[in-house]
Image (cartoon, rainbow, N blue to C red):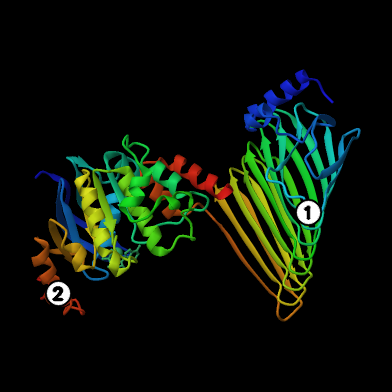
Amino acid sequence: MAPLLTVNDVKLTIDGRPILKGVNLVVNEGEIHAVLGPNGAGKSTLASLIMGINDLKEPDSGEIIFQDKLVNGLDITERAKLGITLAWQEPARFEGITVEEYLKLSGRNNPELDVVECLELVGLDCSYLNRFVDDTLSGGERKRVELASVLAMRPKLAVLDEPDSGIDFASMEDIANMIKTMRDRGTTVLMITHREEIAEIADRATLMCDGKVVQTGNPKDVGQKFKTMCVKCEVRNPELVGGE
Amino acid sequence: MATKNVLDTVAKKFIQIGLPKDLFERNRFNLLVDRNKIIVRYPAPGVRSEVIETPTGVKTKVYVEPGTKLEEPVTLCFGAAETTEVQTTEGEIVVGEGADVKFQVYGAMAEGIKLKHKNKLKVRVEKNARFEFLDLHYNGEDTFVELDTETDAYIGENAYFRSVFKQTRGRAGKVRIVLKAQVDKKGVAVFETKMIGKKDDEIYVEDVIHLNGEESRGISKSRIIAVDETKATFVGETYGNAPRCRGHIDCSEVIRGKDVTVKAVPVVVVNDETAKVTHEAAIGSIDKKQLETLMARGLTEDEAVDVIVQGMLR
Ligand SMILES: Nc1ncnc2c1ncn2[C@@H]1O[C@H](COP(=O)(O)OP(=O)(O)OP(=O)(O)O)[C@@H](O)[C@H]1O
Ligand SMILES: [Mg+2]
């Protein structure tokens, strides 16, 4: 499979503190790629750099390449137009915008857009179409709407930051199925997760710790490594992560 | 009343600044006034009214008979198709006991005109009645209006009054909006103001709610978007004067541009130990996460701002 996204030796320092210390990652076209790692490992920061959000338009050094194009320095809209999108760990709330309008905006360049289907795929029925995407939606509902909006857009690459957080345990399988549907419809998925049952559906997985990639491989092995290594490494023992 | 020709000319000018075409095509208006001329007048069932032309505008008295319930809103338009120095509108609305009605009022100031509009309105919502007053303003982008409007409302026992002021299209101009309510036992007053100011527009909004009756409630909500060099001030005052009354002031002003001047003044006064009045006021630029979310779906920054602002003003 051809690489869709390549992260090449990306380094980033925030307020004098190194957050990413030379991250290397390849996401192949058509795969579901999971990113695992403890809190503070730099997963969301990497996601931000890929999308160009949070004033993180480019790393201090290194390259982010999407389909042979260097995206360092591009603004968010330009990246979205290339086919990248991101779903936030905590999605924004919008006053006065309905779910239907939000999905239609997200999918305005998708000729096959079917907003009802998008909702159904995330386990919400069409009664949600007239609901506002504001704080009257519960946390879990808002997360589902966010995933529906990614389905509506049908990008080439979706970066999902903890799509499973705030979703009840019983619905985990729905979320897993929804991410697979996303992939089956031509979207490559890079998803950050803390849950094993979600990581398991991935084709490949990467473990990040302390601003670095520790291992990339099949999700079972990477999950195992996460459990045996990182859980013990609460103090971020550099020897355990094999660094410095 | 005016001829069809006059109506057509007015319709054309008002549709141009965004009034729904449908209103004219389907003869929706119960009252349509251009400056000081009555163009359309058509009674609504259960609503008695008296309208007189004055040298500078119109005076109206409306009485909604007790128990009247209307599915369709009573539709009024006070506008100006041409420049005139002043337009004065004075009104009195009494909503009888147990009635349930909605007034949709269009303020239409045609493209390119200049005028001062003064409005004074007295509202009385009797016991157990429900009254919604939607005041929708349409101005042209090159229209300049100095608007000075004052509403005084009394909300009776267990009655409900909601007043919405919306600057829907065009320049706001120089605007002073003052809304006052006296709320009786278990009555509810809801004031909402949604406006956008551009260039050197000046916006002043003052909501004053006196919660005088036991368990009365008041909500004062404003959304003001200030662009370019706009000056905007919101003053929200709520007085909790009675046992177990509840009031809330929710004011959010969004600034876009470095030359705007924006002020929010919430005043909360409580004279009873079981009363509770709260407020939240936020002034800031457009929420970054909202902006970035829409941009991540492919909207440009300007498109995203537009969507967010229209949502807030909805
Ligand atoms: N804007 C910022 N200013 C200062 N520190 C930051 C900033 N953004 C991120 N960090 C720090 O960078 C580190 C990595 O944060 P990041 O959010 O990427 O972690 P994460 O792997 O996503 O963690 P989690 O699993 O908790 O979501 C953290 O220590 C965080 O405090
Ligand atoms: Mg994170």
Asked if residue B259 can be seen in this view, the reply is no
Mark 1 lies on a secondary structure that is loop
Decide which of B128, A234 is in the foreground and name it. Answer: B128
The three-letter code of the residue at mark 2 reads Lys
Residue A171 in picture, x, y percent from top left: 29, 64
Residue projecting furthest to the bottom: B273
Q: Disc 1 or disc 2, which is closer to the eye?
A: 1
Residue lying at 43% horizontally and 49% vertically, measured from the top left: B291
Residue lying at 23% horizontally and 50% vertically, measured from the top left: A181
Decide which of A118, B88 is in the foreground and name it. Answer: A118
Task: Quickly name the residue at label 2.
Answer: A227
Subunit of mark 2? A
The three-letter code of the residue at mark 1 reads Gly
Mark 2 residue's CB less than 8 Å from ligand 1: no
How far is disc 1 from disc 2 in space, using C-alphas? 70 Å
Name the image quarter holding residue B147: top right
Task: Quickly name the residue at label 1.
Answer: B67
Residue projecting furthest to the top: B5
